[in-house]
Image (spheres, helix red, strand yellow):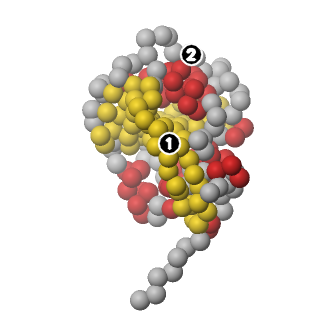
Amino acid sequence: MIHLVEPVVRVGVVVTFLRMERPPADPAPVLPEGVTVRTVANCSVELYRHLYNTVGADYVWWLRRTVPDRQLAALLRDPNISIHVLERGEEILGFYELDRNSWPVVNLSYFGLMPQAVGARMGHAFLRHAVDTAWRMGPRAMTVNTCTADHPRALPNYHRVGFRTLREIPEDWHVPVRLGLVIPEHLKL
């Protein structure tokens, strides 16, 4: 039997795991005028790939890119998964994904802004929207993780809304070259 080895780029990151035990006590900041968040019922694979690939392009989001369409469609049909899109009119500005499969804990699986929305001063309000949406579900706790490949403000923003760091773990990712991701030099091993 011949085993072909797929070419990969080795990427070194430190993954930070965070947890929140109670909802934030301070009032939530408001989103900019004309900006709303919509829960996407029956999210299509095509829309999800657009959200994930565009938001994550600069941050080495690669795992879901390797998931076959059929498997991704099944994940999107899971009633414990919800997709929420930040919009201004017809323009998509970002998204987040909540996962209740470890109930009574809700995981913020993915969160991010489209490139044109980064730096537009709506990230904190959008993150708070995600946190408040999760807490309205009545969980015992909320979790999220980030890594050194993510935007440099990701970890401080998670801390700002009330997450606390549980642990940091170094990881060696083997990112398939076929995905065509631009890997920052400082992350390459």
Q: Residues within 10 Å of mark 2 (few under 14, many from 20)?
A: few
Quadrant of the drawing holding the N terminus: bottom left
Mark 1 lies on residue: 15
Is residue 69 shown left or right of residue 182?
left
Residue 136 vertical position relative to residue 169 in the rendered view, above or below = above
The residue at 56%/26% (across/down) is: 157
Residue 37, quarter of the rendered image: top right
Q: Is residue 57 visible?
A: no
Residue 121 percent coordinates (x, y): 68, 24
The residue at 27%/32% (across/down) is: 104
Residue 149 percent coordinates (x, y): 60, 44
| Circle 2: residue type | Pro
Residue 129 percent coordinates (x, y): 50, 25
Mark 2 lies on residue: 29
- Residues at marks 1 and 2, CA–CA distance in whole angstroms: 28 Å
Q: Closer to the camera: disc 1 or disc 2?
A: 1
The residue at 59%/41% (across/down) is: 148
Local secondary structure at mark 1: strand
Q: Is residue 168 visible?
A: yes
Mark 1 and mark 2 lie on one chain; the one further toward the N terminus is 1
Is residue 110 shown left or right of residue 139?
right
Q: Residue furthest top?
A: 26
Residue 188 vertical position relative to residue 116 in the rendered view, above or below = below
Seen from the viewer's position, the closer of residues 148 and 111 is 148
| Circle 1: residue type | Val
Local secondary structure at mark 2: loop
Q: Residues within 10 Å of mark 1 (few under 14, many from 20)?
A: some
